[in-house]
Image (cartoon, rainbow, N blue to C red):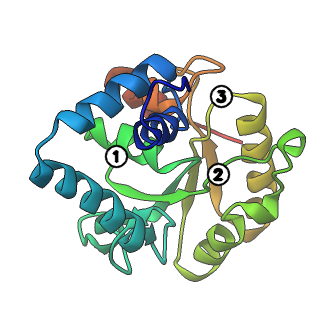
Amino acid sequence: MSGFQAPSLAALIDRFNRLPGIGKKSAQRLAYYVLSMSDEDARAFADAIIDAHSRIHRCAKCCNLTDEELCPICRSSKRDQTTVCVVEDPKDVAALEKTQEYSAVYHVLHGVISPLNGVGPDQLTIKELVKRVNEDGVKEVIMATNATAEGETTAVYISRLLKPLGVKVTRLAYGIPVGADLEYADEVTLVRALEGRREI
């Protein structure tokens, strides 16, 4: 950053710039916006970040983000606990929930198998998924990883682990374009993908 800025402002801009999808100009706009907030709003904003960072953790069952032992979806008696939709990221749960068509539960992997990026199966929550299938009477696992090379590799790897356990493993239909992320798909596309899932 240029020398004309106060060090604390430059540091704030730098922090925003480190967020995904935020370039230097956006970071500068956000920093100036934060400085225009009242002291009360700025404190509330900072407190919300600190509170979320300290309280949010992985659900003991599905590994989605929650501030209790189990997330609201896992706690719900209205959800079908025998069908588990496996997704890469907590944002994918939010995308599927927007459809209001899926009434079972999820399992969040927190990534995909990607040897080029140094991510192997042990760095994902695959062991927790296998344990759920073994212990919770799961009948179907829907693989809803993204339609990328890494997403496909992860889906195939998991299906090979689960098939011997006698569980049905299906894959979302390709209403979702190859290379696209679930979080950017519209509700109609996601509903069609759920309805057209196939066994793998």
What kind of element bears circle 3? loop
The residue drawn where x is 61% and y is 33% is 146
Closer to the chain start, of discs 1 and 2, is: 1
Quadrant (top left/top right/bottom left/bottom right) for the C terminus: top right
Local secondary structure at mark 1:
loop
Mark found first going from the N terminus, 2 or 3: 3
Marks 2 and 3 in Cβ contact (< 8 Å) = no
| Viewer-nearest of discs 2 and 3 | 3
Residue 192 visible within the image: no
Which residue is identified by label 1? 102
Decide if residue 130 is on the left or right side of residue 92. right
Q: Is residue 90 left or right of residue 35?
A: right
Q: Which residue is mark 3?
A: 147
Q: Which residue is mark 2?
A: 169
Looking at the image, residue 42 sits to the left or right of residue 141; the answer is left
Q: Nearer the viewer, mark 1 or mark 2?
A: 1
How far is mark 1 from mark 2, CA to CA? Answer: 16 Å
The three-letter code of the residue at mark 1 reads Tyr
Name the residue type under label 3: Ala
Q: Position of residue 36 (x, y in %)?
A: 18, 34
- 164 up-or-down from 16: above or below: below
Query: Is residue 195 toward the left or the right of residue 130 in the image?
Result: left
